[in-house]
């Protein structure tokens, strides 16, 4: 190979390798941020979300409703981390004791920057809904916010105008 062409090839390869190194560094930094967010979400899930759900759940159980709190998440890929509170409304005829009488509120790890709150209420309910209730920065997830979001959903279900027939 001619010296001039060899030098040109060397220059091309050096630029490519520099770009590759920058790309790899950016990817590693992004992965590191995602890992840190996931670990912090797990801490908040355990120290903030679960206790708030348990407090409300204990009150609901004392009033005859069934409450289940569950956690899911793929530890290996650090994805799909979620905590869900399911409330089965008690005091209804047993034939109506079905999924239509179940309320759920979930707090999910979304990407590596936000926590999403999802909820669903019985479709029989005249204003039943299923869907997003908000996206929040992890730093915004406090016991007070968790309780308020759950209470917003429960108010829609248990408010006086929401009688089932």
Image (tube, helix red, strand yellow):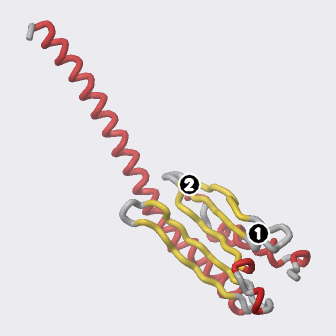
Q: Is residue 6 above or below residue 152?
A: above
Q: How many marks?
A: 2
Quadrant of the rendered image containing residue 134 = bottom right
Point 77% across, 71% down: residue: 123
Residue 82 image offset from top left, x and y in percent: 53, 67
Point 46% across, 62% down: residue: 40
Quadrant of the rendered image containing residue 53 = bottom right
In the rendered view, does 49 fall on the left or right side of 112? right
For the residue labelled by badge 1, is the local secondary structure a helix, a strand or a loop?
helix
Callouts 2 and 1 close, C-beta under 8 Å? no
For the residue labelled by badge 2, is the local secondary structure a helix, a strand or a loop?
strand
Residue 85: image tag: none
In the rendered view, does 43 fall on the left or right side of 25? right
Residue 85 image offset from top left, x and y in percent: 62, 76
Categorize mark 1 by other alpha carbons within 10 Å: few (<14), some (14-19), many (20+). Answer: few
Residue 152: image tag: 1
Quadrant of the rendered image containing residue 1 = top left
Q: Which residue is mark 2?
A: 114
Residue 14 image offset from top left, x and y in percent: 21, 23
Image quadrant in which the C terminus is located: bottom right
Point 86% across, 76% down: residue: 159
Spatial CA distance of label 2 from label 1 is 20 Å
């Amino acid at each position: 190979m001619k010296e001039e062409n060899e030098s040109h090839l060397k220059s091309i390869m050096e630029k490519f390798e520099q770009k590759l190194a920058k790309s790899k560094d950016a990817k590693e930094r992004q992965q590191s941020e995602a890992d840190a967010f996931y670990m912090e979400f797990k801490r908040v899930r355990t120290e903030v979300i679960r206790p708030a759900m348990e407090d409300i759940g204990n009150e609901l159980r004392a009033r005859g409703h069934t409450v289940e709190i569950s956690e899911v998440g793929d530890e290996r890929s650090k994805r799909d981390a979620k905590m869900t509170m399911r409330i089965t409304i008690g005091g209804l005829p047993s034939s109506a004791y079905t999924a239509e009488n179940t309320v759920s509120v979930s707090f999910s790890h979304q990407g590596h920057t936000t926590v999403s709150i999802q909820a669903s209420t019985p479709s029989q309910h005249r204003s039943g809904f299923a869907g997003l209730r908000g996206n929040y920065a992890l730093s915004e997830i406090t016991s007070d916010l968790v309780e308020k979001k759950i209470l917003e959903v429960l108010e829609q279900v248990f408010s006086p105008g929401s009688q089932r027939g």
